[in-house]
Amino acid sequence: MLKRTALFEEHQRLGGRLIDFGGWELPVQYSGVIDEHQACRTAAGIFDVSHMGEVHVEGPDAEAYLNYLVSNNVAKLADSQAQYSVLCNEHGGLVDDLVIYRRARDRFLVVVNASNTDKDFAHMVKIQKQFQGGKARVSVTNESARYSQIAVQGPKAAEIVQKITKTPLAAIKTYWFAEGTVLGSIPAVLGRTGYTGEDGFEIYVPWEKGPEVWRALVEAGQPLGMKPCGLGARDTLRLEMKYPLYGHELTDETNPLEAGAGWVVKLDKGDFVGKTPIVQAKEAGLKRKLVGLRLLDRGIPRQGYAVYSGDGAIRIGEITSGTQSPSTKQAIGIAYVTIPNSAEGTKLTVDIRGQKVAAEVIPTPFYKRPY
Amino acid sequence: MSFPTELKYTKDHEWAKVDGKTITIGITDHAQKALGDIVYVELPAVGRTLKKHETFGVVESIKAVSDLYSPVAGKVLEVNSSLTDEPARINQDPHKGAWMIKLELTDPASATDLMDAAAYTAYVASLK
């Protein structure tokens, strides 16, 4: 039996095509991936992301525990500030990426990927038992079932969300959040965060309030060109930004420095899970790097396709994600390649059904928003 | 969803229009809807010989790659190369303008098991 979010009937009503996504029955698309993608880039898109996992980390030692758990420096956070980070295993591989919201000095909301919620939570509990001999004053609770999460993303997102809340959104900077209410009395966390490369909000409300908040947002956004967006558009939007996705760019064997997550790995902050192997890998010299490429000839790169040197002679990597970019109309891909082949402008080839198709390493993100 | 009665259909969701020995082939409206926005198509060279069920090309949507299977045995007479530049036509006009290839039927027996529109409609309904 697939799990359903509180918004399941809204998706049916809006004509969403429902699929099994990591055990969740969710819409892959409504009007069409390209149409939804363009709506999000030019006006706004609304996404049901209630399948994401929410973990509460609370107590006097919550910050110290989190700083041992994740790679980024949680001590840099102020109240109402959010931070992107990665969760590593003892071998320096990636368990997941996540966002930490500091609600108070001793209260954090940690948001993880849907398909990894159970794994991440088990990892968090395991580390909690190890940290300070299990004596730290911190509680870690999986509250995922209590939240509906709705993302509104796009240049018109703030205007739309403002219609359902009195919280002044203009005062919330990117990667900050506010705790307020929507529709008068519904408590909400309003985070200026997202996974599309657009301005926008991720809104956390009580699970059972999801449908009325969703309907109010759909109504507020429709006159401004907002459209409901499925998992298909969510993937093309993140891909154009080269945002990594667990199972594609991030795996249990991937080193965060190779994955381009070095900017959230703070080796100078003190010990954290996975630090020693990451430092060792860095000192030994990284072997490969995550790059963006585009095809110079016909075809579309897809996950798992082999990448070869420009002359096609030597295998030098693999595609982790790829599509035809709805924004640039180019066939784009993200790939792990060996360091000597990772510089912008390097000519490569991609094996597509036995044909070596010319490609080139290009700067990322693939898409830059005009505002 | 309605399927033209002048066409024949396969379980792989290709259609075939039989015109004497010339067979025109495309994918069905059901197939294009299931695929979503089609952004890439690869079709065979004129002159290639295809066995029944042989892969003759691919269509790719934003999300996925799908093989195209020949409904009959034949030799490629003509290819709708306009689809290369405008693959979205397959979404817009699957049963007519977005035909993909024309074959010369080389084995008439290979065309005998194709479904008519009523049978295909029932088949599509059974997939739900």
Image (cartoon, rainbow, N blue to C red):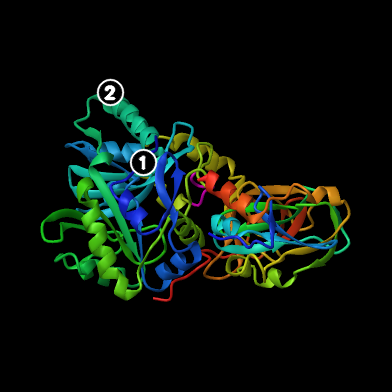
Which secondary structure lies at badge 1? loop
Q: CA distance from mark 2 to mark 1?
A: 18 Å
* Chain of the residue displaying label 1: A
Q: Quadrant of the N terminus of chain A?
A: top left
Type of amino acid under label 2: Gly
Residue at image coords 82%, 67% = B78
Q: Circle 2 sits on which residue?
A: A133
Identify which residue, B122 or A323, lies in the foreground.
B122
Dot 2 or dot 1: first in sequence order is 1
Badge 2 vs badge 1, beta-carbon distance below 8 Å: no
What number is the disc on residue B46? none
Residue A364, can we see it? yes
Residue at image coords 28%, 47% = A6
Number of the front mark, 2 or 1? 1
Q: Position of residue A135 (x, y in %)?
A: 22, 25
Whether residue A221 is in magenta: the answer is no
In this rendering, position of residue A133 left or right of residue A294: left
Residue A84, relative to residue A277: is it above or below? below
Q: Circle 1 sits on which residue?
A: A70
Type of amino acid under label 1: Val
* Chain of the residue displaying label 2: A
Q: Which residues are magenta?
A: A256-260
Dots 2 and 1 on the same chain? yes
Residue A91, relative to residue A343: is it above or below? above
